[in-house]
Structure formats: structure tokens, C-alpha cells
Image: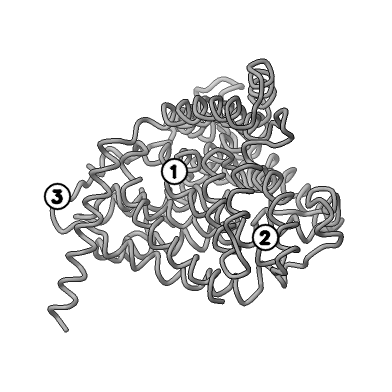
């Protein structure tokens, strides 16, 4: 038994080292990866979807700025989340929780589980909280591989589309233009009891909650560990108040706790009224709103809060630069050519054509994983795949809720090797995509096998 365990561990070690080496050697900076996808989609839109060069350029330009709102939301969730984590009370809480971890293995397991749970509750929350806590663990636990620790924090994001903020299940449960989006395949809503809280989805979620932390645990290298000097992770946002009496009137306002509490009261009152009016939704705007006013009051004064945001803002550059290009890719992906098809539609139709009643959920999942490289947005992906996949599911007699879940999980699955969503975590950690994507590639393979099995046999 001991010998079998050793062989299994050695196999995981070898596969992990191979994945890490491949990624280190061949994965460029995420911005170059983004440009490569842009060039590839230009070629595909012209030669496969039969767009003219003029149409391709027009659609690329039209989509280029389509993610401006989303880009700002993502940048702010990074800045506000980071600032909140650096406030004295939250810092003390993170330090206490990290102090309970006594070994590298424990650190990997706890960070993985916290990230999974946070992403299940809300994907935006999960993107930042895991990486922030992982940094604190890296300060306290010796001998832990920093790359794997941040990869573990990001791996929890795999679960988001099966969680409470999953955009596809929530779209199905919301009355609107469902019939138009699905080309008549669906005229009424599908409740979350048939998607998020269905036995199929809950089984996948439970399996990933068990499997991902254990996989991350066994991927920890036994030699060649790359740790980080804890002093490089220290962030000091304290303010010298020894000479507060000599400050100007403006300086005293900047360091006044009263101003911070007034701002917090205004934000809290707004949320209270939203709850009373039953208009409260835990979306990105709400999370940013909560993070902002909590960060202000927990820092104690405006000066400390602003100092924190200045340091956090530097990490948002990748988001601000790359998201417009992904908007352009989405514009090309969904552009309809002279034959009446878009690249996304042709991709999806290919998988429909090779499917039967048994394999359709699996091929829907795989097609969604492929489309996600070019349309890394749950809502955007639903818009381009639902009109193809749901009518096909009707013709084959496949459950529409199962088909929708296959699209949702495919979208979430390839996020593990799509640097787009890793940018906030990488900015917080101070790493590059190639530092963590080798480990994420292992997560992709294991989770892909697991999710495929459920979709085929459940």
C-alpha cells in the first residue's frame, strides 16, 4: 500500500513538473497571448466566417470598447478589495487566521477551500479574497511554494459558474428575452432549482470541493520550492500621527475618523434602503460598493485609505490594457459573415454535428471550453452559444437545463488556462501568468475529466 502511494505521488510530481516546464517555456505574457488570439480571430473571421476585411475591422473596433464598464468594475474590485485587506482590522484577522496554519500542506488546503467557497458565493469576491489570504499565508508559513499557493487561490475560480453568481443559470431564471436568445427553444424561465440546485450541479460542486484542494496539496513540490521573502510582501499603510496637532485644517480633515464614519454611514444607509425595497443584488457593483465603504471606515481616516489605494492601483494595469482587446475579439467572434454564420456559431455547430443523444452534453461542454478562450465572459458566451445549443438539445430530446449547465461549466473550465481572469490574482500576488499556469493546467485536466464524467453518466 505504501509502495502504491509512492508511485502515485511520483506520477503527480512528474506530471506537475512537466506542465510547469511547458508553461514556463511556451506561455508568453498575457498581453502577447491576447494579441495572438486577436490575430487568430481576424484570420478566422475572414476565411471561415467569410467576413470582408472592412466588416472584420468594423466589428473589431465596435467590440473594442464594449467592455469598458466591466473593465472598470474589475479594476475597482482589485483596488477596493486590496485596500480593504490592508486595513488594520482585516490585516489582524488575516494574520490570526494565517497563524493557525502550521505547515505548507495545511496552507495549500486552506487557501484552496477558502477560494472555492468565496467563488461559489460570488465570483468577483472569490477572485480577490483567495489571493489576498494566500499572500498572508506566504508571510507566515515557511517552506511553502508561492507559485502553487497563488495557483491554489486562483483554482477556486473554477467553481464560479456553478455557484450563486453563475450568469447562465441566473439568466435562465430571469424573465426577459429568453425566447429570442434561444431562437424559440425556451419560452419560459428555468428556475435555479433545476440548474444551480439540481443534483447534477450540486454533485459537480461537491466533487470539486473535495478534489481541487487535495490535488493542490499533492502538487506541492518536494524539492525546488520557490518561496518568497516575507519582507517583500509587507505593506505598511500606517500614518504618522505624532504631530497631528501641527497639521493644517485640511490635514486634520484627511486624518479625521469622523469623515470616514460619515462616508460609511452614507454607504450603509444606501444598502439598507436597497434591502427594504427588495432591490439588493450581490453583483459586481454591490461588492465594489461594500468594499469601498468598509475600506474607508476600517482604515479609520481618508489619508490612510488613499495611501492604500495608491499602492493597489498599480496592479490594475493589466486589466485596463487587455480587456479592450478581448472586447474586440468578442466583436469578431460574434460577427455574422456573408454565409449567415459567426465564428462562434460555426464552432458550436461543429460540435452539434458530431454529437448524439449520449455525447451531446459532453460536446457542449467542450465547445464552451473552446469558445471561452475567445469570449471569456459568461454572459457573452451565453449570447453566442445559446441560439445554437438549446435548439439542438430540443431536437435531440436533451434536457435544456443540463445543456445550459454544460455551457456554464465549459465556460468556467478553461478559465484555468485563460490568463484573462487570473489578472486580478496575479496583480495582488506580484506574479506573472507563467508562474501559476503550469499548476492550473493540472487542475484543468483533472477537473475536465471529472466534469465530463458527470455530464456523460449522471
Pointer 1 with pointer 2, Cβ within 8 A: no
Q: Nearer the viewer, residue 357 or 373?
A: 357
What whole-number distance in Å separates the C-alpha atoms at marks 2 and 3?
43 Å
Check the image and name the residue furthest to the bottom: 1
CA neighbours of label 3 inside 10 A, class few (<14), some (14 to 19), many (20+)? few
Return the disc, 3 or 1, that comes first in the chain's sequence.
3
Residue 161 lies, in percent from the top left, at: 59, 57
The residue carrying mark 3 is 224
Q: Residue at x 59, y 48 (%)?
A: 350
Return the disc, 2 or 3, that comes first in the chain's sequence.
3
Return the disc, 1 or 2, that comes first in the chain's sequence.
2
For the C terminus, give its image quadrant: bottom right
Q: How is the image coloured?
A: one colour
* Vertical side of 200 occupied by 317: above or below: above
User: Could you tell me if residue 310 is visible in this image?
Assistant: no
**Quarter-wise, where is residue 297 in the image?**
top right
Q: Residue at x 62, y 54 (%)?
A: 353
Residue 260 lies, in percent from the top left, at: 63, 39
The residue carrying mark 1 is 425
Label 2: which secondary element: helix
Viewer-nearest of discs 1 and 2 = 2
Q: Residue at x 44, y 43 (%)?
A: 425
The residue carrying mark 2 is 404
What whole-number distance in Å separates the C-alpha atoms at marks 3 and 1?
23 Å
Amino acid at each position: 500500500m505504501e509502495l502504491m502511494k509512492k508511485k502515485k505521488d511520483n506520477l503527480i510530481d512528474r506530471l506537475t513538473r512537466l506542465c510547469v516546464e511547458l508553461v514556463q517555456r511556451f506561455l508568453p505574457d498575457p498581453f502577447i497571448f491576447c494579441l495572438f488570439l486577436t490575430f487568430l480571430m481576424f484570420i478566422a473571421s475572414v476565411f471561415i466566417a467569410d467576413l470582408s476585411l472592412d466588416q472584420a475591422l468594423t466589428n473589431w473596433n465596435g467590440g473594442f470598447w464594449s467592455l469598458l464598464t466591466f473593465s472598470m468594475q474589475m479594476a475597482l474590485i482589485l483596488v477596493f478589495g486590496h485596500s480593504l485587506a490592508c486595513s488594520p482590522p482585516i490585516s489582524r484577522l488575516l494574520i490570526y487566521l494565517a497563524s493557525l496554519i502550521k505547515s505548507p500542506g495545511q496552507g495549500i488546503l486552506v487557501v484552496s477551500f477558502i477560494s472555492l467557497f468565496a467563488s461559489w458565493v460570488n465570483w468577483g469576491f472569490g477572485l480577490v479574497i483567495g489571493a489576498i489570504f494566500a499572500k498572508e499565508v506566504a508571510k507566515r508559513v515557511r517552506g511553502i511554494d508561492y507559485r502553487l499557493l497563488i495557483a491554489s487561490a486562483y483554482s477556486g475560480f473554477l467553481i464560479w459558474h456553478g455557484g450563486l453568481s453563475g450568469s447562465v443559470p441566473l439568466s435562465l431564471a430571469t424573465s426577459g428575452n429568453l425566447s429570442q436568445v434561444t431562437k424559440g427553444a425556451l419560452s419560459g424561465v428555468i428556475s435555479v432549482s433545476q440548474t444551480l440546485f439540481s443534483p447534477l450541479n450540486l454533485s459537480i460542486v461537491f466533487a470539486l470541493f473535495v478534489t481541487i484542494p487535495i490535488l493542490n496539496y499533492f502538487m506541492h513540490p518536494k524539492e525546488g520550492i520557490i518561496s518568497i521573502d516575507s519582507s517583500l510582501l509587507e505593506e505598511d499603510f500606517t500614518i504618522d500621527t505624532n504631530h497631528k496637532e501641527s497639521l493644517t485644517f485640511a490635514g486634520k480633515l484627511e486624518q479625521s475618523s469622523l469623515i470616514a464614519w460619515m462616508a460609511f454611514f452614507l454607504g450603509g444607509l444606501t444598502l439598507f434602503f436597497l434591502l427594504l425595497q427588495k432591490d439588493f443584488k450581490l453583483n459586481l457593483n454591490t461588492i465594489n460598493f461594500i468594499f469601498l465603504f468598509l475600506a474607508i471606515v476600517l482604515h479609520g481616516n481618508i489619508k490612510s485609505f488613499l495611501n492604500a489605494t495608491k499602492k493597489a492601483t498599480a496592479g490594475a494595469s493589466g486589466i485596463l490594457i487587455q480587456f479592450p482587446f478581448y472586447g474586440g475579439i468578442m466583436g469578431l467572434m460574434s460577427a455574422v459573415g456573408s454565409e449567415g454564420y459567426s465564428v462562434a456559431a460555426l464552432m458550436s455547430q461543429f460540435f452539434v454535428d458530431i454529437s448524439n443523444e449520449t455525447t451531446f452534453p459532453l460536446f457542449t461542454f467542450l465547445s464552451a471550453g473552446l469558445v471561452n478562450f475567445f469570449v471569456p465572459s459568461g454572459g457573452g458566451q451565453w449570447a453566442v452559444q445559446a441560439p445554437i445549443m438549446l435548439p439542438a438539445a430540443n431536437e435531440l430530446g436533451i434536457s435544456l437545463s443540463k445543456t445550459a449547465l454544460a455551457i456554464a461549466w465549459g465556460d468556467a473550465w478553461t478559465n484555468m488556462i485563460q490568463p484573462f481572469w487570473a489578472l486580478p490574482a496575479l496583480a495582488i500576488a506580484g506574479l506573472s501568468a507563467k508562474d501559476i499556469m503550469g499548476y492550473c493546467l493540472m487542475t484543468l485536466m483533472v477537473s475536465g475529466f471529472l466534469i465530463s464524467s458527470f455530464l456523460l453518466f449522471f
